[in-house]
Image (cartoon, rainbow, N blue to C red):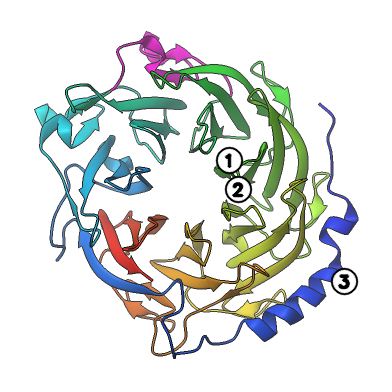
Amino acid sequence: MKRSRFSAGMVATTVFATAIVAASVLGGIASASSTPPGTLAYFDCVGPGGCTSTATPMDDPRGVAIEHDLSRVFVAAHGSDAVDILIRNPKHGELSQKEGDFGCVSETGNGGACGDGRALVGPTGIAVANADLYLVSPSLGSIAQVSQLPSKRWGEPSALNGCTSEDGTGGACVDGHGLTGATSVTIQPKIGGYVYVGGTNSIAFFSRNKTSGLLTQIGCINDDGSDGCMNGIIPGTVTDMTIPEHSKTLYATASGTPGALLTFTFQSGILTQTGCINDDGSNTCADSASPLLNPVSLDVDGKGKSLYVAANGSDTLTGFKRDPKTGGLSLPVCYNETGTGPCTIVKGIADPQSVRICHNNACVLATAGDGIASFNRSDKTGLLTQPGAPFVPCFNATGTGGCTPASGLHGATAVDSTFGTHRTAYVTGATDDTLTIFSLK
């Protein structure tokens, strides 16, 4: 495969400097006269240690996804080898769980407390399409499907391709390729025809049967062309991926030092790499002109105009302007707690883990350290500001760094939010074994 690079104009340093000035002007404290979009208010948590309710089993939750009709929230419980199915109250967002296989599926069935699954050892990523869940496991190098059955119970399809793993898992799954260290998963939005799994220096691609939800592998791309995959630039574990709506472009973060922000196009589900941006221009990638060391998560707004990247090694959130027609990225603007970069100074963003754009495109949420930071987003410019006093810009487990304390946020990892009148945000606390619930304005 031809290794492509971004043109210098796409990340021009002079334009970047102009965008930083604009961010400084627009990046100040939000007005207290009205509640700005992105304002969070702690509501409750699910789990031990003072939460109103519990979920079983939910040790070390790493991933969260919300059903499209907002009726349920799904949690990938890494330490429990399970997925939890939680019923969501549409008015306030509180959660409850039914018993047995109405409420969870695990690798062992937990002595009858959950449905019995396979290829669910240590799931980290989860994606949902209709009533089909897809969970990835780094230790097994696998993707497993969990679906709601006609009985309303949850379980894995009996068909062999209900799961695919790097080595077939002793004949329990289909023998796949490019799945070693499977960590992240994403589904083509709206259409749901293709599913992508990010692993160690690789991305595997699957076609999805829209009736049964079953997957069939159609290819893979990795860093050296081995294992029957195409050759590309993937300098680390693919920790997150996103596909903008009405687009045939996939973006991915590859963790590492420096790691990279990767761009692909797809035709009939097959990826072709079109770009690579990283912190220093190494490995034939373009220099980001913004702090981008060890990128771990990313998201694109619903109109396809902005892309935001959480760079863990830089303790930075970087926003790019995106061309909806070409998928090209430009004008990086960054946010961190120190102003280095140079970046706009914000609170609660050290040690970022994930970033998600609210469904109304008016706010951005980022988990970092043991907490979550929120931002108001300008739909016109893509620039971010934090809620100012008396509103809260960030919450964390200790109340340090200008943030407000909240329960269940130790090890804050994944975040997802709802849309509509009564918006809610859900944050996994991997260390606290919790799911924290916030009201979202």
Give the image location of residue 181, x and y in percent.
Answer: 50, 33
**Residue drawn at 78 percent across, 45 percent down:** 326
Residue 275 lies, in percent from the top left, at 77, 43
From mark 1 to mark 2, how far is it between C-alphas?
Answer: 5 Å
Q: Which residue, given by chain and number where applicable, does mark 3 sit on?
A: 14
Asked whether, in this view, residue 156 is left or right of residue 356, the answer is left
Magenta region includes residue 167 = yes
Q: Amino acid at mark 2?
A: Ser
User: Could you tell whether 359 is left or right of 382 in the image?
Assistant: left
Magenta segment boundaries in residue numbering: 156-178
Label 3 to label 2: alpha-carbon separation: 27 Å
- 152 vs 26: above or below: above
Q: Neighbour class for label 3 at 10 Å: few (<14), some, many (≥20)?
A: few
Residue 416 locus on image (x, y percent): 40, 54
Number of on-image labels:
3
Using a 10 Å C-alpha cutoff, classify the residue at mark 1 as few (fewer than 14 neighbours), some (14 to 19) or many (20 or more): many
Kind of residue indicated by mark 1: Thr
Res 76 seen here: yes
Q: Name which residue lies at 32% across and 76% down.
A: 398
Q: Which mark is residue 255?
A: 2
- From the viewer's perspective, is residue 160 above or below residue 154? above
